Amino acid sequence: ELDSLASEVAALRGAAAARDAELAAASVKLAERDAELAALAERLRGRDAELDSCRAQLDAAARAAEAQARGAQHAEKRAAELEAMKEAAHARAESLDSRCAQQAKELGAASKGAR
């Protein structure tokens, strides 16, 4: 009976050693997976930083485009104002030309009358 018990103990020790070896192999695999996950997490952090940088660049480009659009609107408004001023100046010049011509006629007639 002792031999039978010794044999069972030896079998149980062998099974325990096999389980220990399986657990050690599983621990190694888990450590490898942990390392892979850590590397992936690091890559994701890098990608997040890249995305943040891209978002910042897009925001800056949008602000620049808005400012440029406002500048273009202002330039168009100013150009319209200048065109209106130019037309008013031409109208005023034509009016002054007409008045000068009329006064020249009047002076010419008065000059003839004085002779």
Image (cartoon, rainbow, N blue to C red):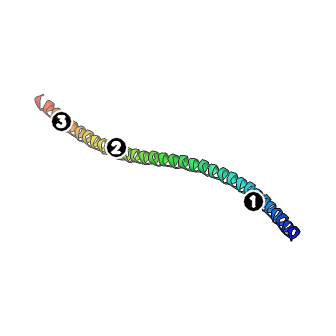
Crowd class of label 3 (few under 14; some 14 to 19; many from 20; radius 10 Å):
few
Of discs 3 and 1, which sits in the foreground?
1
Left or right of residue 31: residue 76:
left
Q: Which mark is residue 103?
A: 3
Neighbor class of circle 1 (other Cα within 10 Å; few <14, some 14-19, many 20+) is: few
Q: Quarter of the image holding residue 92?
A: top left
> Type of residue at label 3?
Gln
Kindly state the secondary structure of the residue where label 1 is placed.
helix
Q: Residue furthest top?
A: 115
The C terminus, quarter of image: top left
Which residue is at a point 84% across and 68% down the rendered structure image?
5
Instruction: Name the side, left or right, on which 86 lies relative to 52.
Output: left
**Front residue of this view, candidates 54 and 83:** 54
* Residue 33, quarter of picture: bottom right
Point out the tag, 2 or 1, that comes first from the N-terminus: 1
The secondary element bearing badge 2 is classed as helix
Q: Earlier in the sequence, mark 3 or mark 1?
A: 1
Nearest to the eye among marks 3 and 2: give it: 2
Q: Is residue 113 left or right of residue 43?
A: left
- The numbered disc on residue 23 is 1
* Residue type at numbered disc 1: Leu
Q: Residue at x 46, y 45 (%)?
A: 64
Callout in the foreground (2, 1): 1
Nearer the N terminus, badge 3 or badge 2?
Answer: 2
Of residues 1 and 79, which is closer to you in this image?
1
Tell me which amino acid carries mark 2: Arg
Task: Specify whether 40 is left or right of 10.
Answer: left
Residue 78: give its label: 2
Q: Nearer the viewer, residue 69 or 98?
A: 69
**Alpha-carbon neighbours of circle 2 within 10 Å: few (<14), some, or many (≥20)?**
few
Where residue 1 appears, as percent x and y from the top left, is 86, 71
